[in-house]
Image (cartoon, rainbow, N blue to C red):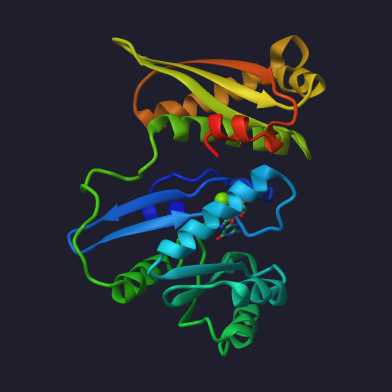
Amino acid sequence: MLNALMGEKLAIVSPKVQTTRHRIKGILTTDEFQIIFSDTPGIIDPKYKLHEKMMMAVKSALEDADLALLLVDINDNWQEADDIFSSLRLKGPSLLIINKIDSAPKVKQGQAISFFKDKKYVKEIIPLSALNGQHVEDLLKKIAELLPAGEAFYGDDEISDLPTKFFVAEIIREKIFSTFEEEIPYQTTVIVNEFKQKSTLVKIRAEIIVQRESQKAIIIGEGGKMIKQIGSEARKEIEQFVDQKVFLELFVKVRPKWRENELFLKEYGY
Ligand SMILES: Nc1nc2c(ncn2[C@@H]2O[C@H](COP(=O)(O)OP(=O)(O)OP(=O)(O)O)[C@@H](O)[C@H]2O)c(=O)[nH]1
Ligand SMILES: [Mg+2]
């Protein structure tokens, strides 16, 4: 959704839940307006300290927002979404976004609209598809209408408040999400510890952090097969993102229980 609104890929995407772990700001500036979007993790009951940090990112975004976009997947459980939306303490109005309309019959849209239309937190309902862009422009117009007027906060060439290093680490994390099943992506984080501009390319060194030796072996793969694959997929996308040739070096490190460790979490940007 953030990527569709921005017309640019800032947020990594995967079919697995809990892909996003940070609050990611996307700054969209046109001749008429500047909108600052905050993408956040999904709302969950925290099981680890990492989850607590993720929910703090949600909280900070809600506290700042002049307008909330509450997203529900048309194929998910609407009642569960309603329970969560009703419990939020929102500062401003909210738009209820019914996403993925490309993946459901039209009649289901009507049913979803009927379900949500009288909910107290709903200012307006917008069904759309982030995937094919259907009604995304309508949503942008609606957001611009509802936001309070003010001076632009960021320069018109800024697209996020986060550094390039962050997005590089995210791209590598996305490849880990798409390469491995089940637990590995959830036990892993990525940190970029070198980003050097050379004459003809950017040299990047990143560490993939896991919790156990066995996970390190899986990520490296037989004869380094898996890590080579991740590196090559990530490098291509990073090259597009920084618009330069990239030399990418990946290392795997074991940090037992990093998800529970305040110091590690801080070091890894959470
Ligand atoms: N068919 C369809 N799929 C979509 C659409 N929007 C997103 N998806 C898919 O839904 C899945 C989840 O997308 P994400 O962007 O990772 O979802 P998220 O809500 O940010 O989830 P987390 O970051 O994990 O909390 C991915 O496989 C996307 O390709 C859409 O409009 N239509
Ligand atoms: Mg996400």
Residue 246: x, y in percent?
42, 18
Point 61% across, 57% down: residue: 42
Up-down: is 167 above or below 233? below
Point 71% across, 17% down: residue: 220
Q: Residue furthest right?
A: 214
Occupied quadrant, residue 113 = bottom right
- Number of numbered discs: 0
Point 54% across, 26% down: residue: 191
Q: Nearer the viewer, residue 143 or 4?
A: 143
Quadrant of the drawing holding the C terminus: top right
Q: Nearer the viewer, residue 220 or 206?
A: 206
Q: Nearer the viewer, residue 139 or 38?
A: 38
- Left or right: where does residue 162 sit relative to residue 226? left
Residue 36: x, y in percent?
34, 57
Point 49% across, 46% down: residue: 11
Residue 41 visible in the current orientation: no
- Left or right: where does residue 85 sit relative to residue 220? left
Ligand 1 falls in which quarter? bottom right
